[in-house]
Amino acid sequence: MSARLKSDEAQKKQADRGCFQPCSIETGMRILGGKWTGSILWHLKDGPVRFNDLSRMIGGASKKMITERLRQLEAQGLVDRKVMQTSPVSVEYSLTDFGCSALGFLEKLRQWSETLPDQFSVAD
Amino acid sequence: MSARLKSDEAQKKQADRGCFQPCSIETGMRILGGKWTGSILWHLKDGPVRFNDLSRMIGGASKKMITERLRQLEAQGLVDRKVMQTSPVSVEYSLTDFGCSALGFLEKLRQWSETLPDQFSVAD
DNA sequence: CGGGATCCTCAAAGATACTG
DNA sequence: CAGTATCTTTGAGGATCCCG
């Protein structure tokens, strides 16, 4: 993977768009900012996980949400989906290299969250 | 306010799911996961910024959203608000120590976002 | 300048039921 | 087991006007 510098054209486009480059933070949050997105990726960090296991790990999310986020992450290349032709079928989800590249960020988030006073985990 | 009441059944189910401790990722995202939250904090990292300057830095966000997030972050102790009695008044926002503690996470997010192919910054 | 007050929209999320 | 298919809700976010 080559280091990618922003082309002059890209910079110009951004400037044209209004000088406000949507900062990297915004871009990143658009991808990882879903309510369950981070949790899903995080629970895949130790290797492939099957759908229902994942669903159980993330207690608050409906299967529908798990599926939707998973599909999006797959389309974006962060997650790999592997169908095992057992009976009944089992499906394993795992992180791609790209997906793994987001783990550093998630680890930082986890660390930060651990320092939070209890009030935050309850309500705010 | 018509069918506002959740059925007992539904509440029970929710409670049941609540037994799964929401992982740290979820907690963190609830606080920092707003569409503009990260951007706001990030733009405060180099020192106090006045409201309208902040508003200008974050091109896509309405003043209402800036205000709302700022108020929330203030209530949560991440941001400090200082009113200068000039005329007309000017208001400076800055990060508290607690707010600064989130910068590591934001920096990781920024780094990760920089590695993204262009398609992500345009649309996805 | 730094907001507040209103009204509105729409995508994300949730509930529920069903299926190959 | 691993999802679909619908329907409903909600609330974050946006648009607009106003104010001291």
Image (spheres, coloured by chain):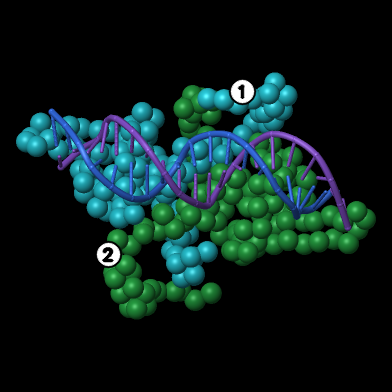
Chain colours: A green, B cyan, C purple, D blue
Is residue B78 something that shows in the picture?
Answer: no
A87 lies left or right of A91: right
Q: Give the label on residue B25, or none.
A: none
- Residue placed most toward the observer, B70 or A96: B70
> Disc 1 residue type?
Leu
Image position, residue A90 (x, y; %): 84, 55
> Disc 2 residue type?
Cys
Q: Which residue is mark 1?
A: B5
Residue at 70% x, 21% y is B8
Image position, residue D5 (x, y; %): 74, 52
Residue at 26% x, 39% y is B94
A84 lies left or right of B108: right
- Residue placed most toward the observer, A111 or A37: A37
Question: Label 1: chain?
Answer: B
Q: Are marks 2 and 1 in contact (CB under 8 Å)?
A: no
Q: Residue D17 sits in which quadrant?
A: top left
C7 lies left or right of A61: left
Image position, residue C7 (x, y; %): 37, 38
Residue at 6% x, 36% y is B87
Q: Give the label on residue A19, or none.
A: 2
Say above or below: A96 vs D20.
below
Q: Identify the secondary structure beneath mark 2.
A: loop
Image position, residue A37 (x, y; %): 59, 49
Say above or below: B121 vs C9.
below
Q: CA distance from mark 2 to mark 1?
A: 47 Å
- Residue placed most toward the observer, D13 or A52: D13
- Residue placed most toward the observer, B74 or C15: C15
